[in-house]
Image (cartoon, rainbow, N blue to C red):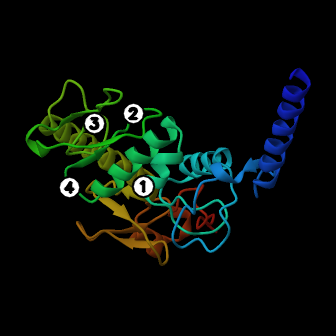
């Protein structure tokens, strides 16, 4: 009986081993032998290839695609897009969370009340139902505060109106500073009337629009004196200066 049991058990194990071997196939991705009975079915109705990818490789492929670009998750072997239920079945918990979050944000991104968080390393977005009436948007994930109106970090200590006023004042001051710097570089003040005069082209013979006086642009010497007596009336550093005869 012991011998019979031993032979029967050995034969049973042999038959089982052969059955498993006959029902195994290599995964088309990792080449590991996989029991055909546990291979997933086709991932998409559009797949026109054999269902020969193991669950481990499917999960790794889906997770990698979600990490790279959650907009489109496809079959590991072909471009067929995978439905949400397939992604949900095979993705890791972390991958599925990222996929669902991105799907929700994609669905609401065109909503005027949708706000993306500007917090460091946060990629969360949410609907702010109160809109401009309550402009502080606190992120549900990281609590970073964003201004709904200005679409930037919340200007702590200032209302939106105060922030706008400060911004406008700073903008005007910056423009005035730039204008002063430009005039200092490209314009001159005529001594007779103190008018700011700018030369954009032409010769150095200038006529003041305010007092109608004529002068040299380079050294501001009176032009009538120059015409009547000679170029020695230019400043000595002026390139038009000529010593008197």
- Between the residue at mark 1 and the residue at mark 2, the CA separation in whole angstroms equals 29 Å
Name the residue at the left extreme.
133
Name the residue at the front extreme.
1
Query: Which SS class for mark 2?
Result: loop
- Going by the image, does 224 lie left or right of 233? left
- Between the residue at mark 3 and the residue at mark 4, the CA separation in whole angstroms equals 15 Å
* Residue 105 at x, y percent in the picture: 34, 50
Q: Which mark is residue 84?
A: 1
Q: Which mark is residue 119?
A: 2
- Between the residue at mark 3 and the residue at mark 2, the CA separation in whole angstroms equals 8 Å
Q: Quadrant of the C terminus?
A: bottom right
> Which one is in front in this view, the residue at disc 1 or the one at disc 4?
1
The earlier-in-sequence mark between 1 and 2 is 1
Q: Residue at x 23, y 66 (%)?
A: 211
- Going by the image, does 160 lie left or right of 221? left
> Which one is in front in this view, the residue at disc 3 or the one at disc 1?
1
The earlier-in-sequence mark between 3 and 2 is 2
Q: Residue at x 31, y 50 (%)?
A: 175
* Residue 154 at x, y percent in the picture: 26, 33
Task: Sort mark 3 into few (<14), some (14-19) or many (20+) by Cα contacts within 10 Å.
Answer: many
Whether tag 3 and tag 2 are in contact, CB under 8 A, the answer is: no
- Between the residue at mark 1 and the residue at mark 4, the CA separation in whole angstroms equals 26 Å
* Residue 66 at x, y percent in the picture: 54, 49
Q: Which residue is mark 3?
A: 146
- Between the residue at mark 3 and the residue at mark 1, the CA separation in whole angstroms equals 31 Å
Q: Which mark is residue 38?
A: none
Q: Which residue is mark 4?
A: 112
């Amino acid at each position: 009986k012991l011998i019979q049991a031993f032979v029967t058990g050995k034969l049973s194990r042999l038959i089982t081993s052969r059955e498993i071997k006959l029902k195994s196939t290599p995964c088309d991705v990792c080449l590991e032998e996989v029991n055909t009975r546990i291979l997933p079915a086709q991932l998409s109705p559009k797949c026109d290839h054999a269902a020969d990818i193991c669950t481990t490789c499917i999960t790794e492929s889906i997770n990698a695609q979600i990490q790279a670009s959650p907009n489109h998750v496809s079959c590991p072997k072909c471009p067929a897009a995978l439905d949400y239920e397939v992604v949900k079945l095979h993705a890791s918990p972390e991958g599925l969370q990222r996929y669902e979050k991105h799907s929700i944000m994609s669905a609401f991104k065109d909503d005027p009340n949708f706000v993306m968080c500007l917090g460091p390393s946060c990629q969360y977005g949410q609907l702010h139902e109160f809109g401009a009436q309550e402009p502080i948007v606190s992120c549900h994930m990281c609590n970073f505060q964003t201004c709904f109106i200005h679409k930037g970090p919340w200007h702590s200590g200032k209302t939106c109106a105060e922030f706008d006023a400060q911004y406008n004042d700073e903008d005007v001051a910056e423009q005035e500073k730039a204008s002063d710097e430009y005039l200092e570089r490209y314009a001159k003040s005529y001594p007779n009337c103190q008018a700011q005069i700018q030369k954009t082209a032409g010769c150095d013979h200038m006529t003041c629009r305010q007092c109608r006086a004529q002068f040299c642009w380079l050294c501001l010497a009176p032009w009538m004196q120059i015409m009547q007596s000679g170029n020695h009336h230019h400043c000595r550093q002026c390139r038009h200066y000529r010593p008197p005869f």
